[in-house]
Image: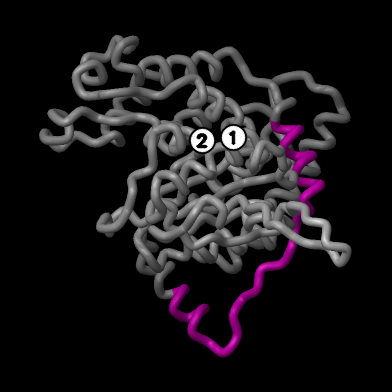
């Protein structure tokens, strides 16, 4: 794949970026052979992982969210584990616990038994079904990449990513994610119903005698190298200004936009700008470019901002949505 850039970079960096882009395109195609008709979702999930972040997949049951996470783990060479979140799930069920053991000589000591969070790709299925206490057990792991049990630090494997799923329809017996945990997710990815042609293809491909199987295209070591490469890609002044304008204009106490001041209860913090900066670079690399554009920022604005903003009661009563507000914000970017 030919890489296009207007910025002079070292030949070594250009070579590394070209190789990484080809590898990522191969991985994306491999995921697409199993997860049909969700190209945008696949690209966003890959972008989140390439940026070193986590993603929240929101969609009704049966849209291949679980299959997507499993396939990404296989293709990207990541050791994956799955946790089914339920109301009775305890923090120790996620991070692990210490047990008292007695040796043959009668000496007693504590031994740490690692929980399923000790993996490279954790699928948190129906994360909003667990209690707030259990949800918070993921906070330190998602942000700090280690957990603390009885005062002892336990580092998580590298890389470490969480892809969580959430059902937006059934709310009985669920606990809404707190703002602090939502902010840990780089993206909120909305998984929609497939088109007619895609659904026909799904029916034919998944009800036959044989099913397509995903195969590895990337190793964990390659992924770590590509994540470091993303941070080396240059960002133009126009892209930086677009990110700052979007994020600051989304805050009601700083925004010059009247509808934002009137309708928005709280807006995104600096972590949203960091997410846009990294994700724009990752998106450009996936598409074979050495630097992001303002269009990349606009394309990623909704998945980055929608879970970091909230409308007040009056705006919701008038039928306003966060998506409407983000569209207004994007329209202010020249």
Magenta highlight on residue 218: yes
Number of numbered discs = 2
Residue 26 in view (yes/no): no
Could you tell me residue 147's position as x and y percent?
64, 41
**Residue positioned 11% across, 35% down in the render:** 317
Name the residue tied to disc 2: 184
Could you tell me residue 262's position as x and y percent?
19, 18
In the image, farthest residue toward the front: 106
**Residue positioned 26% across, 24% down in the render:** 265
Q: Residues within 10 Å of mark 1 (few under 14, many from 20)?
A: some
| Element type where label 1 sits in the image | helix
| Element type where label 2 sits in the image | loop
Q: CA distance from mark 1 to mark 2?
A: 7 Å
Vertical arrangement, residue 317 with respect to residue 39, above or below: above
**Residue positioned 61% across, 63% down in the render:** 71
Question: Which quadrant, please, contains the N terminus?
Answer: top right
Identify the mark at residue 243; answer none if there is no mark. none
**Residue positioned 62% across, 35% down in the render:** 284
In magenta, the rendered stretch is 201-230
Name the residue tied to disc 1: 143
């Amino acid at each position: 794949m030919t890489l296009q850039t207007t910025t002079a970079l070292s030949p070594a960096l250009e070579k590394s970026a070209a190789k990484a882009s080809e590898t990522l395109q191969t991985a994306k195609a491999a995921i697409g052979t199993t997860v049909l008709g969700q190209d945008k979702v696949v690209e966003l999930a890959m972008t989140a992982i390439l940026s070193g972040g986590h993603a929240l997949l929101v969609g009704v049951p049966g849209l291949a969210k679980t299959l997507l996470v499993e396939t990404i783990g296989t293709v990207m060479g990541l050791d994956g584990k799955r946790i089914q979140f339920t109301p009775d799930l305890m923090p120790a069920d996620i991070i692990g616990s210490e047990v008292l053991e007695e040796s043959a000589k009668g000496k007693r000591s504590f031994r740490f038994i690692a929980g399923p969070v000790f993996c490279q790709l954790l699928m948190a299925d129906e994360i909003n079904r667990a209690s707030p206490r259990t949800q918070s057990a993921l906070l330190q792991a998602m942000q700090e990449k280690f957990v603390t049990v009885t005062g002892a630090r336990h580092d998580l494997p590298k890389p470490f990513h969480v892809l969580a799923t959430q059902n937006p329809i059934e709310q009985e017996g669920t606990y809404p994610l707190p703002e602090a945990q939502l902010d840990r997710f780089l993206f909120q990815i909305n998984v929609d119903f497939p088109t007619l042609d895609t659904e026909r293809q799904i029916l034919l491909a998944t009800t036959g005698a044989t099913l397509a199987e995903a195969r590895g295209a990337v190793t964990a070591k390659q992924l770590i190298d590509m994540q470091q490469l993303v941070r080396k890609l240059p960002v133009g002044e126009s892209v930086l200004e677009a990110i700052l304008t979007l994020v600051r204009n989304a805050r009601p106490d700083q925004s010059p936009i009247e509808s934002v001041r009137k309708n928005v209860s709280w807006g995104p913090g600096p972590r949203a700008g960091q997410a846009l900066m990294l994700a724009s670079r990752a998106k450009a690399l996936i598409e074979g470019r050495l630097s992001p554009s303002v269009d990349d920022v606009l394309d990623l604005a909704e998945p980055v901002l929608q879970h970091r903003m909230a409308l007040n009661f009056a705006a919701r009563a008038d039928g306003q949505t966060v998506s409407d507000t983000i569209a207004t914000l994007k329209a202010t970017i020249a």
